[in-house]
Image (spheres, helix red, strand yellow):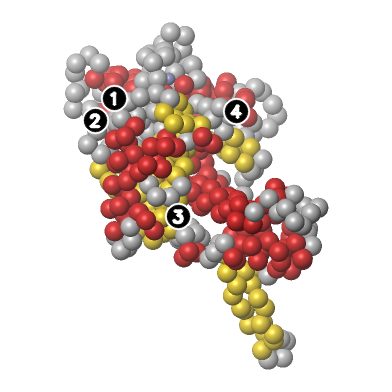
Amino acid sequence: MLKSKASPVSLEQRNTTRLRVLEHIRAKGSVSRIDIASALQTSPATVTAATADLISAGLVKETESQAQSKSGKRGRPRVLLQLDGQMHLVAGLKVARQVISVILVDFEGNELASHKYALDKARMSPQEFVSAIREALEETCSQIDRSVAHLAGVSIGVAGLVDANKNFVHWSSSITERNIDFSHLLSNELPCPAFVDNDANLVAKAEQLFGLGKGLKNFLVVTIEHGVGLGIVLDGKLYRGERGCGAEFGHTKVQLDGALCQCGQRGCLEAYVGDYALIREMTVTGHNNDMETVSDIHDRANSGDDRASSVLARAGQMFGLGISNLINLYDPECIIVSGAQISFEHLCSNEVMTRIQNGVVNVDAPLPQIKVHHWGDMMWAKGAAAYGIEQISILKVKELTANAS
Ligand SMILES: [Zn+2]
């Protein structure tokens, strides 16, 4: 707290201004103080104070641009502000069943290194989970002759019910125990701040920043891989729910007392649509044990196998039911179906579109667009890194306040 000087502007307001200035510089690449003041509708003095703080925190740096006058003569150089990209190294991770995908970026989001760290088991104890993350990070940092000690922050995407504000994982298919507070486990293992979030939220963040969600205010991202996830962006912001357990689309019920889900309940959407559910349906009779991926099931269906065709058709119908429920709830501009899986045809067939159309309340307007975006795990990791940069920015700005006391 600033004790000696009574300020009419609260610290919270000052931090909000600093963050707004920082985000504006990030969005523009390089921008002058006067243009920031005009865009944020605030006074040049306020912007000057905020940028001085951001420069001292090593988040922003000054550069000069040589303005050209109309006569072709060199004008006075303009001082522009840019992010100080190389100052902070941020890691984004996506934990999947067989692999941890890692990406290292600078503070501007430029990729510096990436790595896939193989996991020998799909479900880990909480300690095994953080140890694997540490090893994956060490291997990635060594690619650019850095170590974990150089990281400013780490952001981890994991499937399941995650309270991101508390790094608390209620449940995840990657972790053997429920209700784990990862704050201490991660701070014991890593020398920098670490953030855990639901992986579908991070995909939504990546779609918003780099992908098909760019420029959209209201959109949904449905992720399909082992399970089914949902990221909700409303009015440009990620919606997480009150307990961090919102958007569990995969565990909405599509059948009373239906198929057993990996969450322990019955009739969940992902128990019909997730990769594991399709493979389980194919192998349940003890036959077709060579089915390992959804692509194998597609190949079998394409060669005339009735069981494979009916498993895929049922998944499509359940998916259509789920999507029509989403449209009825959110009325989004667009739904992006995202995942590493190559074979989504069974979810985009004419029969599925008809099912969606029939399930949506009838208004005299076209359905929202449904777009498929094939993303590898690295793009999920990139979304995690973007979340990491955002969280590091907030922490660094809060440190400014702490240092001023
Ligand atoms: Zn479930």
User: Measured along the vertical axis of the image, is residue 336 above or below residue 139?
Assistant: above
Ligand 1 rendered quadrant: top left
Q: CA distance from mark 2 to mark 1?
A: 7 Å
Eye-nearest disc, 4 or 2: 4
Residue in front for this viewpoint, 404 or 70: 404
Q: Residues within 10 Å of mark 3 (few under 14, many from 20)?
A: many
Residue matched to label 1: 279
Q: Amino acid at mark 1?
A: Ile
Q: Residues within 10 Å of mark 2 (few under 14, many from 20)?
A: some
Say if mark 3 contacts mark 2, CB within 8 Å. no
Check disc 2 and report its element: helix, strand or loop: loop
Q: Find out if the beta carbon at label 2 lies less than 8 Å from the nearest ligand 1 atom.
A: no
Residue in front for this viewpoint, 129 or 234: 129
Q: CA distance from mark 3 to mark 1?
A: 41 Å
Residue matched to label 4: 242
Residue matched to label 2: 292
Eye-nearest disc, 3 or 4: 3
Q: At 23% from the left edge and 28% from the top edge, which residue is drawn?
A: 291
User: Measured along the vertical axis of the image, is residue 306 above or below residue 402?
Assistant: above
Q: Amino acid at mark 4?
A: Glu
Residue 244 drawn at (x, y percent): 54, 30
Residue 83 drawn at (x, y percent): 56, 64
